[in-house]
Image (tube, rainbow, N blue to C red):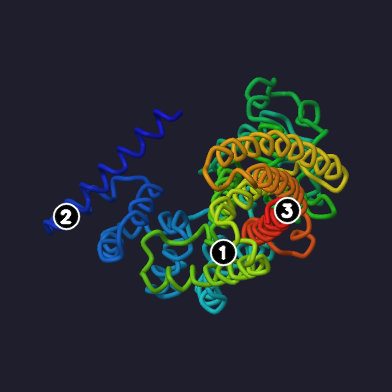
């Protein structure tokens, strides 16, 4: 897999270099040919990988019939920028061939006024199905589903179903199953295409379809959908309302997008960034977005530093304390981030609930206690032997070792336990733990680290 990834990166980098070189030379006909031979997802990747000036040129060279497909793969910033330059009717026209869920995703990212204008430009049939998809939150099964599904009744033969499929101009992508519904469109089962092909033509659908199937509730969060697909190795799955009525289906490509977006969100949020941030956004735009979290971090740093001032006399008395001071909060911060990351990941994939969290909390406490004890001994003895052999420090070498070792153990346990508790607390407060957990945890481990180290030093050193 890494070999394939490296090949793809090198290939993409080479194509990007060729396109930029052709743009600089003014060879726009060649750029157009090169660009429009790529799949829409690759065109979107090229646009996102290009600085603003060249990006505008590339977008103008994309064929009109490809623009809608390219839009669905762009990040929010770029999508808004290009959509802002289009008339609502034009946007409706270039996206009309996309799947319902993809159109709904695009419109969901646009301002409400623009989305309403685009909807008004659509035909009544298209507008109805898109509005139905938009009625569900984007991060739910209803928001992910595509309404293009094939349904059949149980009281027909396999031959009739096959004949019906052959009459269709186009079968929806990623179709691996056909859903069996009653006269009220209530989902009662599914029949795999492989079963259709291998069954006798005269057999009834009622004899061969799978009856023990549960549709995915439309209100289920997208992370729950991803977990279901992962656990059951699904390619597609039906979506139903609270009465069991079939609404649509979710396919593996949509779930893959959820997994990637969730991973991006967790990674970027740790730094206070949005997963949809444009890498090549203008300087002012990027600076404005990052300023908030830098300001919050500065406030927490000042808060942590203020606790050091309490022990000002101790620090001025022994210069060694200032040298050793960063060790304790650093170790506590690492231990806390390990627990924080573990719990956030466990919550996102559905492994953690109120039923098992108590066990996990005791586990993290035990792990931190063991690690804290081991590393406290290591650093404590190391500091003792180091300063015991340094002129002028022999009298309080043992005190320094005890202070650093004891404070490290306290902070490791505090960081790990608080790191495990924090995501659950923030989630119950409707705050994203991936976005704010790191900042809060860092502040806590720094304050506890400073107080425990300098407090112990005031007892054993000064």
Q: Above or below — where is 338 with respect to 424?
A: above
Q: Nearer the viewer, mark 1 or mark 3?
A: 3
Circle 2 residue: 29
| One can see residue 128 in this view | yes
Circle 1 residue: 126
- Residue shown at the point (66%, 58%) measured from the top left: 450
Residue 241's quadrant in the figure? Answer: bottom right
| One can see residue 100 in this view | no
**How much space separates mark 3 and mark 2, taking CA atoms?**
73 Å
**How much space separates mark 2 and mark 1, taking CA atoms?**
35 Å
Q: Could you tell which of marks 3 and 2 lies nearer the N-terminus?
A: 2
Q: Nearer the viewer, mark 3 or mark 2?
A: 3
Identify the disc placed on residue 16. none
Residue 192: x, y in percent? Answer: 67, 30
Residue 53's quadrant in the figure? Answer: bottom left
Q: Secondary structure at mark 3?
A: helix
Residue 409: x, y in percent? Answer: 72, 44
**How much space separates mark 1 and mark 3, taking CA atoms?**
70 Å
Instruction: Verify CB contact (< 8 Å) between mark 3 and mark 2.
Output: no
Residue 440: x, y in percent? Answer: 67, 61
Q: Is residue 31 left or right of residue 38?
A: left
Which of 293/305 is in front? Answer: 305
Identify the disc placed on residue 456. 3
Query: Which quarter shows the C terminus?
Result: bottom right
- Residue shown at the point (66%, 35%) measured from the top left: 234
Q: Residues within 10 Å of mark 1 (few under 14, many from 20)?
A: some
Q: Secondary structure at mark 1?
A: helix
Which of 1/371 is in front? Answer: 371
Q: Could you tell which of marks 1 and 3 lies nearer the N-terminus?
A: 1
């Amino acid at each position: 897999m890494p070999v394939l990834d490296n090949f793809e990166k090198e290939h993409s980098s080479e194509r990007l270099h060729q396109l930029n070189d052709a743009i600089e030379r003014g060879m726009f006909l060649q750029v157009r040919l090169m660009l429009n031979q790529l799949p829409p997802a690759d065109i979107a990747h090229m646009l996102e990988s290009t600085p603003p000036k060249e990006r505008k040129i590339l977008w103008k060279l994309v064929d009109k019939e490809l623009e809608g497909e390219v839009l669905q793969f762009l990040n929010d910033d770029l999508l808004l920028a290009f959509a802002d330059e289009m008339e609502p009717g034009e946007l409706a026209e270039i996206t009309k061939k996309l799947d319902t869920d993809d159109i709904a995703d695009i419109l969901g990212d646009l301002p409400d006024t623009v989305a309403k204008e685009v909807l008004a430009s659509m035909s009544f049939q298209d507008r109805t199905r898109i509005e139905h998809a938009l009625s569900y939150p984007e991060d739910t099964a209803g928001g992910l589903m595509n309404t293009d599904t094939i349904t059949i009744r149980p009281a027909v033969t396999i031959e009739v179903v096959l004949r019906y499929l052959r009459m269709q101009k186009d079968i929806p992508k990623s179709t691996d199953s056909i859903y069996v519904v009653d006269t009220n469109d209530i989902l009662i089962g599914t029949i795999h295409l492989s079963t259709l092909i291998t069954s006798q033509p005269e057999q009834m659908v009622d004899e061969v379809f799978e009856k023990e199937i549960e549709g995915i509730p439309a209100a289920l969060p997208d992370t729950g959908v991803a977990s279901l697909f992962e656990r059951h190795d699904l390619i597609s799955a039906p979506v139903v309302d609270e009465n069991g009525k079939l609404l649509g289906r979710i396919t593996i490509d949509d779930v893959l997008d959820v997994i990637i977006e969730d991973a991006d969100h967790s990674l970027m949020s740790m730094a206070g960034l949005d997963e949809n941030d444009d890498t090549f956004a203008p300087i002012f735009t990027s600076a404005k977005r990052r300023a908030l979290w830098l300001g919050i971090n500065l406030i927490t740093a000042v808060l942590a530093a203020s606790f050091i001032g309490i022990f000002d006399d101790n620090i001025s008395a022994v210069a060694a304390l200032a040298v050793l001071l960063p060790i304790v909060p650093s170790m506590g911060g690492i231990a806390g981030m390990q627990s924080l990351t573990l719990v956030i990941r466990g919550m996102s994939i559905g492994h953690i609930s109120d039923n098992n969290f108590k066990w996990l909390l005791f586990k993290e406490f035990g792990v931190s206690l063991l690690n804290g004890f081991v590393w406290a001994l290591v650093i404590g003895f190391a500091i003792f032997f180091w300063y015991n052999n340094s002129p002028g420090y022999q009298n309080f070498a043992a005190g320094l070792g005890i202070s650093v070792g004891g404070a490290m153990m306290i902070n490791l346990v505090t960081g790990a336990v608080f790191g495990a508790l924090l995501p659950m607390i923030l989630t119950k407060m409707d705050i994203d733990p991936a976005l704010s957990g790191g900042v809060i945890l860092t502040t806590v481990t720094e304050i506890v680290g400073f107080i425990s180290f300098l407090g112990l030093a005031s007892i054993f050193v000064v």
